[in-house]
Image (cartoon, rainbow, N blue to C red):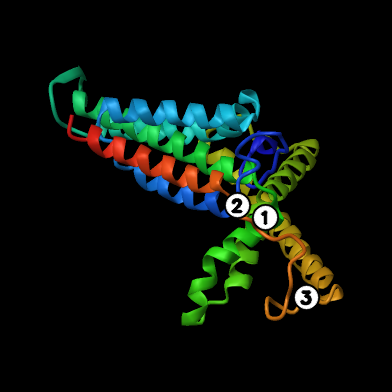
Amino acid sequence: MLQNVIIGQYVAAPSFLHRLDSRSKLISAFLLVFIIFLANNWYANGLVILFTLFTVLISKIPISFIYKGIRPILWLVLFTFILHLFMTRGGEIVFNFGFLTVYEEGIRQGLFIAVRLLTIIMLTSLVTLTTKPIDLTDGLESLFNPLKKIGLPAHELALMMSIALRFIPTFMQETEKIMKAQMARGVDFTTGPIAKRIKALLPLLIPLFISAFKRAEDLALAMEARGYRGGEGRTKYRLLVWKWQDTSVIFLCMVFGLMIFVLRYI
């Protein structure tokens, strides 16, 4: 299951999204996260779902691959839905059994939150799935450049964020490897009470932390051996080029946001 995490992975494909500038994809992802939280009724959330499905289709990334990636998140979405289902009150009573009461507003809010979580995860994951790590780093650095005036190290911050995203799948695979090694020695992670399963996961932390520090040290040594000294005076082999397609994508996101804003009052 851990190997199916899609955050931080890149999948090559001849799609429109892959050809976009990384800066336009980052800006669009930020705008879409904000826009999705504006959806407050069935019409707006229906449009959000259609827009997300359209974006996934034009990315030419297999639906099965994306489904495997979000499958581990479905438990969190289900838990959030159930939490709103029983904690939110309002409207008519739909179900009542003892101390458990389900209201119309609880169902409504639970579904809306579930849609927001799933669409945000899918749309933000498409940024890393359709952008090479080096392009993502350059895009973040370019967007952070105006903050250099207040003393923010744009290059180092962008590099740190891109490395963190890149190593998420690596650490997931490392966790899977450690779990299989411990299962071969008799540790059971799948049966028993929840408390017992959580207790069985604790021995994973020490080898995982040791592996993380070792990889960080190896990466630091490799960067020093190649003469890395930060962003000052560095030139770029690949230059980012902003095209009309990037402007059209930003404009499309703004039109989508305007439509969601109008649908809020229907």
Q: Which mark is residue 64?
A: none
The quarter of the rendered structure image containing the N terminus is top right
Work out how far the residue at label 2 is from the one at label 3, CA to CA, in angstroms.
23 Å
Q: What residue is at 20 percent from the left and 23 percent from the top?
A: 104
Instruction: Identify the residue position indicated by label 2 in the image.
Output: 22
Q: Horizontal and vertical percent for residue 252?
A: 43, 40
Q: Is residue 156 left or right of residue 182?
A: left
Callout 2 crowding tier (Cα within 10 Å): few <14, some 14–19, many ≥20: many
Distance in Å between CA atoms under marks 3 and 1? 18 Å
Residue 45 is drawn in which quadrant? top left
Query: In the drawing, does residue 89 fall left or right of residue 260?
Result: left
Element class at badge 2: helix
Kind of residue indicated by mark 2:
Ser
The answer to whether marks 2 and 1 mark residues whose Cβ atoms lie closer than 8 Å is yes
Q: How many marks?
A: 3
Q: Could you say which is closer to the camera, residue 99 or residue 266?
A: 266
Q: Quadrant of residue 153?
A: bottom right
Cβ atoms at labels 3 and 1 below 8 Å apart: no
Q: Nearer the viewer, mark 2 or mark 3?
A: 2
How crowded is the residue under tag 1: few (<14 C-alpha within 10 Å), some, or many (20+)? some
The image quadrant of residue 186 is top right
**Three-letter amino acid code at disc 1?**
Asp
Please identify the quadrant where the C terminus is shown. Answer: top left
Q: Considering depth in this image, is 34 or 93 the residue closer to the camera? A: 34
Residue at figure coordinates x 72%, y 49% from the top left: 170
**Residue 109 location in percent, x, y?**
27, 32
Q: Residue furthest right?
A: 225
Q: Sequence-wise, which precedes: disc 2 or disc 1?
A: 2
Looking at the rendered structure, which numbered label has been put on residue 135? 1
Q: Looking at the image, is mark 3 or mark 1 earlier in the sequence?
A: 1
> Would you name the residue on which mark 3 appears?
228
Q: Residues within 10 Å of mark 3 (few under 14, many from 20)?
A: few
